Image (spheres, helix red, strand yellow):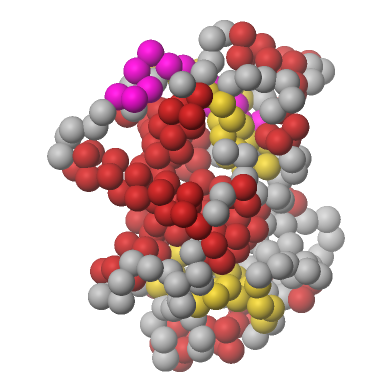
Amino acid sequence: MVGLADLNGDEITELLDRAVEFRRLADERALPSPLAGATVGNLFFENSTRTRNSFRLAAKRLGAETVEFTEVGSSVAKGETVADTVRTIEALGVDLMVIRHGSPGVPHRLREFVTSGLLNAGDGTHEHPTQALIDLLSLRDAFSQEGTGESLAGKTVTVVGDILHSRVARSNIHGLRALGARVLVCGPSTLLPRQLPGAEFFTDLDAALAQSDAVNLLRVQFERQRGAFFPSPAEYYRLFGMTQTRLTRSGRDPWVLAPGPINRGIELSSEVADGPRSLILKQVANGVFIRMACLATLMEARR
């Protein structure tokens, strides 16, 4: 799976349901080993903590061995192409490869060079499909917990922040729309793309919150920005930072997600991050089960 845009609502739901089943089996200490004898290569050409460790744990819990790759100290640093590096890793006997790269479209292009199954762990500003699945599952859990049913159909979810540079936003919008949710995007006008099919645009966070059942707070990606998109972090926090006062004022008490890493005092306050409506740690826990579901499904498709 190299993009969530390749999947329809039924296919997304099947992955979410499979993750829930793995979660149940893990609680019962009865996990199967559908990847026994297989090898998963984790190829991370960008830094990562949550995603990389989550994929590593997911593979091992399903019985696979892992090969770990980072660009620092590798042959890529000596001038080797990404395609040659990936083919070299595949030649070690890798069955599935998890790819993160800073350039959009790299996992799609690599399908021309390798026969191993590919999973996209984030490609530039394009997509981050497994993070979107994590967010969708966490929302299903939350809505079910509050007694409104686990369906996302008819719910309104607002994605806030650096939409322009966010791969998470793009995957989330597709996944939410595929499951019947209404999607709002909100941020400084300088960080909103000109077009984003399936989303409604807001630059007033309070106006968006007044309509929201949940809000997903994106990290401001300073490392991807080339120029000043807002006056200062303090000004961003004043206008778009999530505080308890702002949540209470909305009158909606929305659930709060953040794909992380979170920047306290920029995207949200500690009171919100650690509060009762925060799903942030739930997202981290769900990450392992979502990635187990993706790895197992991809392996089955190859057999």
**Which residue is drawn at the image coordinates 30% and 24% (left, top)?**
33
**Which residue is drawn at the image coordinates 21% and 39% (left, top)?**
25
**Which residue is drawn at the image coordinates 41% and 86% (left, top)?**
252
* Image height of 225 relative to 101, above or below: below
In the image, the segment drawn in magenta is: 33-45
- Horizontally, residue 200 falls left or right of residue 57, namely right
Residue 193, horizontal then vertical, whole percent: 77, 67
- Horizontally, residue 269 falls left or right of residue 30, namely right
Give the residue at the far right of this rendering: 227
Residue 21, horizontal then vertical, whole percent: 28, 45
The N terminus is located in which quarter?
Answer: top right
How many numbered tags mark residues here?
0
Q: Is residue 2 shown to the viewer in this render?
A: yes
**Which residue is drawn at the image coordinates 56% and 87% (left, top)?**
206
* Image height of 125 relative to 72, above or below: below
Give the residue at the far left of this rendering: 28
- Horizontally, residue 41 falls left or right of residue 193, namely left
